[in-house]
């Protein structure tokens, strides 16, 4: 009976959920390591750009180093299976913060460039918001499927 209910709810099998969680985790690892590397390679430019934001001001250097280091730390946590739940939650929080920042930039009419690096920098602010929303959805799915696997909803 329980299996029939799960099929009706279209819950993937435990192995499929595990694969989805792995894919989500490694997509975040790729994203965060890519953007962290770009930020660190252009640290002076990144720092000077965020220094132009009135609400950051004197904390530009701390954030310029702190953000990519945080992205790297979250990436490492995501690679460790026993810490993956924590990593997915941290990735979700960071993506929500980044998205709130992007929405602020759009609403304020700011013309500051994006310092995410590479291809992501070429996105418009609106495209970047949708990109982030996609990753937020992935993080939520990863958390849900990771929790389902841990709760033995097999």
Image (cartoon, rainbow, N blue to C red):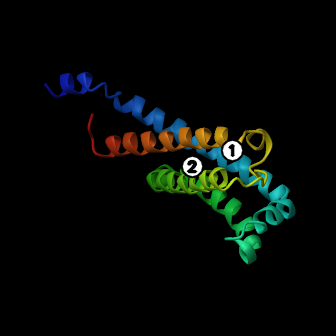
Residue under label 1, please give it: 125
Task: Answer above or below: position of 90 versus 20.
Answer: below
Specify which label sits upstream in the sequence, 2 or 1: 2
The residue that appears at 83% across and 65% down in the rendered structure is 48
In this rendering, the label closer to the viewer, 2 or 1: 1
Tell me, yes or no, whether the two marked residues, 2 and 1, touch with CB atoms within 8 Å: no
Looking at the picture, how far across and down is residue 89, in whole percent? Answer: 47, 54
Label 1: few (<14), some or many (≥20) within 10 Å?
Answer: some
The residue that appears at 20% across and 25% down in the rendered structure is 3
Q: Is residue 76 left or right of residue 64?
A: left
- Quarter of the image where one finds residue 62: bottom right
Looking at the picture, how far across and down is residue 143, in whole percent? Answer: 42, 46
Q: Is residue 8 left or right of residue 84?
A: left
| Helix, strand or loop under label 2 | helix
The numbered dot on residue 79 is 2
Q: Nearer the viewer, residue 78 or 80?
A: 78
The residue that appears at 66% across and 56% down in the rendered structure is 108
Looking at the picture, how far across and down is residue 9, in whole percent? Answer: 26, 27
| Helix, strand or loop under label 1 | helix
- Quarter of the image where one finds residue 104: bottom right
């Amino acid at each position: 009976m329980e299996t029939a209910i799960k099929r009706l709810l279209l819950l993937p099998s435990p192995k499929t959920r595990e694969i989805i969680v792995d894919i989500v985790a490694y997509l975040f690892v790729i994203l965060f390591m890519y953007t962290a590397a770009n930020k660190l390679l252009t640290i002076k430019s990144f720092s000077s750009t965020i220094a132009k934001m009135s609400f950051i001001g004197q904390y530009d250097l701390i954030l310029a180093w702190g953000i990519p280091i945080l992205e790297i730390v979250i990436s490492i946590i995501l690679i460790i299976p026993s810490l993956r739940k924590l990593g997915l939650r941290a990735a979700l929080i960071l993506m929500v913060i980044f998205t709130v920042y992007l929405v602020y930039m759009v609403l304020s009419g700011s013309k500051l460039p994006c310092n995410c690096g590479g291809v992501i920098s070429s996105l418009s602010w609106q495209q970047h918001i949708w990109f982030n929303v996609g990753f937020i959805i992935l993080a939520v799915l990863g958390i849900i499927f990771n929790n389902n696997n841990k709760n033995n909803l097999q």
